[in-house]
Image (tube, rainbow, N blue to C red):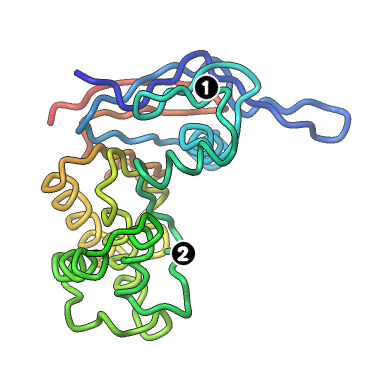
Amino acid sequence: MTKILNVENLEKSYDSGSKKLTILKDINFSVEAKETFAIVGPSGSGKTTLLGLCAGLDQPDSGVVELCGVQLNGLTEDERALLRNKKVGFIFQDFQLLPTLTALENVAVPLELQGDKHASKRALELLEKVGLKDRTHHYPSQLSGGEQQRVALARAFSNRPEILIADEPTGNLDADTGEKVVKLLFDLNKEEGTTLVIVTHDIELAQKTGHILKLKGGQIIENTKTAL
Protein backbone atom coordinates (compact mmCIF):
# COMPACT_ATOMS: atom_id res chain seq x y z
CA MET A 1 0.00 0.00 0.00
CA THR A 2 1.06 3.60 -0.64
CA LYS A 3 2.05 5.54 2.46
CA ILE A 4 0.35 8.92 2.41
CA LEU A 5 1.88 10.05 5.71
CA ASN A 6 5.20 8.77 7.02
CA VAL A 7 6.76 9.96 10.27
CA GLU A 8 10.25 8.93 11.37
CA ASN A 9 12.11 9.68 14.62
CA LEU A 10 10.12 12.84 15.26
CA GLU A 11 11.11 15.01 18.24
CA LYS A 12 9.75 18.37 19.38
CA SER A 13 10.45 20.47 22.45
CA TYR A 14 9.87 24.03 23.61
CA ASP A 15 11.75 26.33 25.93
CA SER A 16 9.83 26.89 29.15
CA GLY A 17 11.72 29.47 31.20
CA SER A 18 15.16 27.99 31.82
CA LYS A 19 13.95 24.44 31.13
CA LYS A 20 13.43 22.54 27.90
CA LEU A 21 10.02 20.92 27.73
CA THR A 22 9.90 17.79 25.56
CA ILE A 23 6.51 17.55 23.83
CA LEU A 24 7.16 14.62 21.46
CA LYS A 25 9.90 12.01 21.58
CA ASP A 26 10.86 9.21 19.16
CA ILE A 27 7.60 9.23 17.15
CA ASN A 28 7.46 6.69 14.30
CA PHE A 29 4.34 5.67 12.33
CA SER A 30 2.82 5.68 8.86
CA VAL A 31 -0.66 6.05 7.41
CA GLU A 32 -1.62 4.17 4.25
CA ALA A 33 -3.69 5.64 1.44
CA LYS A 34 -7.47 5.39 2.04
CA GLU A 35 -6.90 4.22 5.62
CA THR A 36 -8.97 5.58 8.53
CA PHE A 37 -6.55 6.42 11.32
CA ALA A 38 -7.02 7.81 14.85
CA ILE A 39 -4.49 9.58 17.05
CA VAL A 40 -5.73 9.42 20.65
CA GLY A 41 -4.50 10.50 24.04
CA PRO A 42 -5.35 12.70 27.01
CA SER A 43 -4.87 16.48 27.04
CA GLY A 44 -1.17 17.30 27.08
CA SER A 45 -0.14 14.05 25.41
CA GLY A 46 1.18 15.87 22.32
CA LYS A 47 -1.70 15.20 19.89
CA THR A 48 -2.09 18.80 18.70
CA THR A 49 1.67 19.30 18.34
CA LEU A 50 1.92 16.09 16.32
CA LEU A 51 -0.95 17.19 14.12
CA GLY A 52 0.77 20.51 13.39
CA LEU A 53 4.02 18.75 12.46
CA CYS A 54 2.25 16.21 10.19
CA ALA A 55 0.45 19.02 8.34
CA GLY A 56 3.58 21.14 8.02
CA LEU A 57 2.11 23.90 10.20
CA ASP A 58 5.18 23.61 12.42
CA GLN A 59 8.63 22.05 12.08
CA PRO A 60 10.22 19.37 14.27
CA ASP A 61 13.53 19.68 16.15
CA SER A 62 14.58 16.46 14.43
CA GLY A 63 13.06 13.64 12.40
CA VAL A 64 11.27 13.40 9.08
CA VAL A 65 7.67 13.97 7.94
CA GLU A 66 6.65 12.86 4.47
CA LEU A 67 3.19 13.96 3.37
CA CYS A 68 1.62 12.84 0.07
CA GLY A 69 5.03 11.69 -1.15
CA VAL A 70 6.73 15.00 -0.34
CA GLN A 71 9.30 15.41 2.44
CA LEU A 72 8.31 18.50 4.44
CA ASN A 73 11.78 19.07 5.88
CA GLY A 74 13.50 21.71 3.80
CA LEU A 75 10.33 23.14 2.21
CA THR A 76 9.67 26.84 2.70
CA GLU A 77 6.54 27.98 4.54
CA ASP A 78 4.95 28.94 1.20
CA GLU A 79 5.75 25.54 -0.32
CA ARG A 80 4.21 23.76 2.66
CA ALA A 81 1.10 25.98 2.40
CA LEU A 82 0.77 25.16 -1.31
CA LEU A 83 0.99 21.42 -0.57
CA ARG A 84 -1.72 21.74 2.10
CA ASN A 85 -4.02 23.72 -0.21
CA LYS A 86 -3.77 21.08 -2.94
CA LYS A 87 -3.60 17.82 -0.98
CA VAL A 88 -4.99 18.28 2.54
CA GLY A 89 -8.45 18.94 3.97
CA PHE A 90 -9.00 20.13 7.55
CA ILE A 91 -11.88 19.95 10.03
CA PHE A 92 -11.49 21.76 13.35
CA GLN A 93 -13.31 21.58 16.68
CA ASP A 94 -14.37 25.24 16.40
CA PHE A 95 -15.49 25.01 12.71
CA GLN A 96 -13.37 27.99 11.53
CA LEU A 97 -15.91 29.22 8.99
CA LEU A 98 -15.55 32.74 7.60
CA PRO A 99 -18.39 34.72 9.27
CA THR A 100 -18.91 37.15 6.36
CA LEU A 101 -19.42 34.36 3.80
CA THR A 102 -22.49 32.19 3.25
CA ALA A 103 -22.35 28.40 3.63
CA LEU A 104 -21.98 28.05 -0.15
CA GLU A 105 -19.18 30.64 -0.30
CA ASN A 106 -17.34 29.02 2.62
CA VAL A 107 -17.30 25.65 0.83
CA ALA A 108 -16.32 27.17 -2.52
CA VAL A 109 -13.38 29.22 -1.16
CA PRO A 110 -10.62 26.54 -1.39
CA LEU A 111 -11.59 25.84 -5.01
CA GLU A 112 -11.84 29.52 -5.98
CA LEU A 113 -8.33 30.07 -4.60
CA GLN A 114 -7.16 27.42 -7.06
CA GLY A 115 -8.99 29.12 -9.93
CA ASP A 116 -11.66 26.41 -10.31
CA LYS A 117 -14.48 27.76 -12.50
CA HIS A 118 -16.88 25.09 -11.21
CA ALA A 119 -16.35 25.94 -7.52
CA SER A 120 -19.99 26.83 -6.82
CA LYS A 121 -21.31 23.69 -8.52
CA ARG A 122 -19.01 21.43 -6.47
CA ALA A 123 -19.86 23.35 -3.28
CA LEU A 124 -23.59 22.94 -3.92
CA GLU A 125 -23.20 19.20 -4.53
CA LEU A 126 -21.32 18.76 -1.26
CA LEU A 127 -23.78 20.84 0.76
CA GLU A 128 -26.55 18.66 -0.65
CA LYS A 129 -24.64 15.54 0.48
CA VAL A 130 -24.37 16.84 4.04
CA GLY A 131 -28.07 17.73 4.10
CA LEU A 132 -27.78 21.52 3.83
CA LYS A 133 -29.24 22.20 0.40
CA ASP A 134 -31.77 24.61 1.91
CA ARG A 135 -29.13 26.46 4.00
CA THR A 136 -26.71 27.44 1.22
CA HIS A 137 -27.28 31.20 1.56
CA HIS A 138 -27.21 31.28 5.37
CA TYR A 139 -24.28 32.81 7.23
CA PRO A 140 -22.50 30.86 10.03
CA SER A 141 -24.26 32.95 12.71
CA GLN A 142 -27.60 31.71 11.32
CA LEU A 143 -26.58 28.04 11.62
CA SER A 144 -26.49 25.68 14.60
CA GLY A 145 -23.18 24.14 15.73
CA GLY A 146 -24.00 20.89 13.97
CA GLU A 147 -24.87 22.72 10.75
CA GLN A 148 -21.67 24.74 10.92
CA GLN A 149 -19.62 21.56 11.30
CA ARG A 150 -21.42 20.04 8.30
CA VAL A 151 -20.47 23.13 6.26
CA ALA A 152 -16.87 22.68 7.47
CA LEU A 153 -17.09 19.02 6.44
CA ALA A 154 -18.23 19.94 2.94
CA ARG A 155 -15.45 22.54 2.71
CA ALA A 156 -12.81 20.00 3.79
CA PHE A 157 -13.75 17.69 0.90
CA SER A 158 -14.22 20.46 -1.68
CA ASN A 159 -10.75 20.29 -3.24
CA ARG A 160 -10.78 16.45 -3.29
CA PRO A 161 -7.91 16.14 -0.81
CA GLU A 162 -5.70 13.06 -0.65
CA ILE A 163 -5.76 13.22 3.15
CA LEU A 164 -8.27 14.78 5.53
CA ILE A 165 -7.25 15.73 9.06
CA ALA A 166 -10.04 16.11 11.61
CA ASP A 167 -9.00 17.69 14.93
CA GLU A 168 -11.57 16.82 17.65
CA PRO A 169 -14.40 17.09 15.05
CA THR A 170 -17.14 16.46 17.62
CA GLY A 171 -15.55 18.39 20.50
CA ASN A 172 -18.07 21.27 20.42
CA LEU A 173 -21.14 19.18 19.61
CA ASP A 174 -23.65 17.31 21.77
CA ALA A 175 -23.54 13.49 21.58
CA ASP A 176 -26.45 13.11 19.14
CA THR A 177 -25.25 15.83 16.74
CA GLY A 178 -21.69 14.54 17.02
CA GLU A 179 -22.80 11.05 16.01
CA LYS A 180 -24.54 12.40 12.89
CA VAL A 181 -21.47 14.44 11.90
CA VAL A 182 -19.19 11.40 12.38
CA LYS A 183 -21.45 9.25 10.16
CA LEU A 184 -21.37 11.93 7.45
CA LEU A 185 -17.58 12.20 7.81
CA PHE A 186 -17.02 8.47 7.34
CA ASP A 187 -19.60 8.16 4.54
CA LEU A 188 -18.15 11.09 2.57
CA ASN A 189 -14.63 9.86 3.19
CA LYS A 190 -15.47 6.44 1.76
CA GLU A 191 -17.29 7.94 -1.22
CA GLU A 192 -14.44 10.34 -2.04
CA GLY A 193 -11.68 7.74 -1.45
CA THR A 194 -9.80 10.02 0.96
CA THR A 195 -7.38 9.05 3.74
CA LEU A 196 -8.83 10.09 7.10
CA VAL A 197 -6.79 11.00 10.19
CA ILE A 198 -8.83 11.85 13.28
CA VAL A 199 -7.23 13.42 16.35
CA THR A 200 -9.43 12.81 19.38
CA HIS A 201 -9.59 12.01 23.09
CA ASP A 202 -12.82 10.06 22.39
CA ILE A 203 -11.92 6.37 22.36
CA GLU A 204 -15.37 5.39 20.98
CA LEU A 205 -14.77 7.59 17.93
CA ALA A 206 -11.23 6.20 17.55
CA GLN A 207 -12.59 2.65 17.53
CA LYS A 208 -14.58 3.43 14.38
CA THR A 209 -11.26 3.75 12.49
CA GLY A 210 -9.04 0.99 11.13
CA HIS A 211 -5.87 2.03 12.95
CA ILE A 212 -5.28 3.59 16.40
CA LEU A 213 -2.16 5.37 17.61
CA LYS A 214 -2.14 6.14 21.34
CA LEU A 215 0.02 8.89 22.81
CA LYS A 216 0.90 9.49 26.43
CA GLY A 217 3.44 12.00 27.70
CA GLY A 218 4.63 12.72 24.16
CA GLN A 219 5.41 9.10 23.33
CA ILE A 220 3.59 6.32 21.46
CA ILE A 221 2.27 3.71 23.90
CA GLU A 222 0.21 1.76 21.35
CA ASN A 223 0.08 1.45 17.55
CA THR A 224 -2.51 -1.10 16.44
CA LYS A 225 -4.73 -1.92 13.50
CA THR A 226 -8.32 -2.57 14.59
CA ALA A 227 -10.48 -5.49 13.50
CA LEU A 228 -12.67 -3.45 11.12
* Residue at (47% x, 80% y) in the render: 100
Quarter-of-image position of residue 126: bottom left
Viewer-side residue, 63 vs 223: 63
Is 194 situated left or right of 144 in this image?
left
Of the 4 image quadrants, the one containing the C terminus is top left
* Residue at (19% x, 71% y) in the render: 124
* Residue at (46% x, 63% y) in the render: 94
User: Residue 14: x, y in percent?
Assistant: 73, 31
Name the residue beneath numbered marker 2.
96
Tell me which amino acid carries mark 2.
Gln
Viewer-side residue, 105 vs 89: 105
Mark 1 and 2 residues: CB-CB less than 8 Å, in contact? Answer: no
Image vertical order of residue 150 relative to residue 200, above or below = below
Viewer-side residue, 82 vs 19: 82
Quarter-of-image position of residue 36: top left
Residue 219 marker: 1
